[in-house]
Amino acid sequence: MSCLFCRIVAGEVPATKVYEDDALVAFRDIAPAAPFHVLIVPREHISTLNDFEPAHDALVGRMVRTAAALAKEHGYHERGYRTVFNCNREAGQSVYHVHLHVLAGRSLAWPPG
Ligand code: 5GP
Ligand code: ZN
């Protein structure tokens, strides 16, 4: 299995997991861009945001609602947080297993670089 995040999901590569269920795993980013930075990934290998299909609608909803739940659990839901899907080269996607970034704990500039 060559996909890094599939290997994290399978437990073959260590990660600091903060949440998992039958469809999702969430873990701390290895190079955090904010005091709180986690990645929410589906257990299923899906390469990019472009590859979600209607059958994934419930999965996408769970990813987004899990982001909100983790922000709340860690105390950031009122002060604020950011969710990001980077899709393909110009957005800076570096791991081609779709993941939702959740960033919090500092003021986040807009527009992003
Ligand atoms: P992307 O640039 O594709 O949107 O985000 C990929 C993220 O994965 C980056 O923020 C990067 O720091 C993180 N990352 C890359 N390799 C690893 C790893 O082995 N473990 C963890 N926990 N995060 C990783
Ligand atoms: Zn994968």
Image (cartoon, helix red, strand yellow):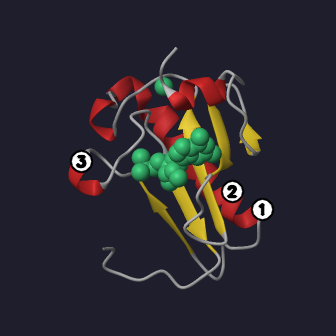
With respect to residue 95, does 72 lie above or below? below
- SS class of the residue under badge 1? helix
Q: Marks 2 and 1: CB-CB under 8 Å? A: yes
Type of the residue with mark 2: Ala
Q: Which disc is residue 69 wearing?
A: 2
Residue 13 placement (x, y as % from top left): 67, 29
List the residue tagged with mark 3: 89
- SS class of the residue under badge 3? helix
User: Dot 1: few (<14), some (14–19), or many (≥20) neighbours within 10 Å?
Assistant: few
Residue 3 placement (x, y as % from top left): 48, 24
Q: Quadrant of the C terminus?
A: bottom left
Report if residue 25 is visible in the image. Answer: yes
Q: Is label 3 or label 2 in front? A: 3
User: Dot 3: few (<14), some (14–19), or many (≥20) neighbours within 10 Å?
Assistant: few
Q: Earlier in the sequence, mark 3 or mark 2?
A: 2
Residue shown at 66% from the left, 36% from the top: 25
Res. 76 image quadrant:
bottom right
Q: Is residue 1 left or right of residue 17?
A: left
Instruction: Name the residue nearer the viewer: 96 or 62.
Output: 96
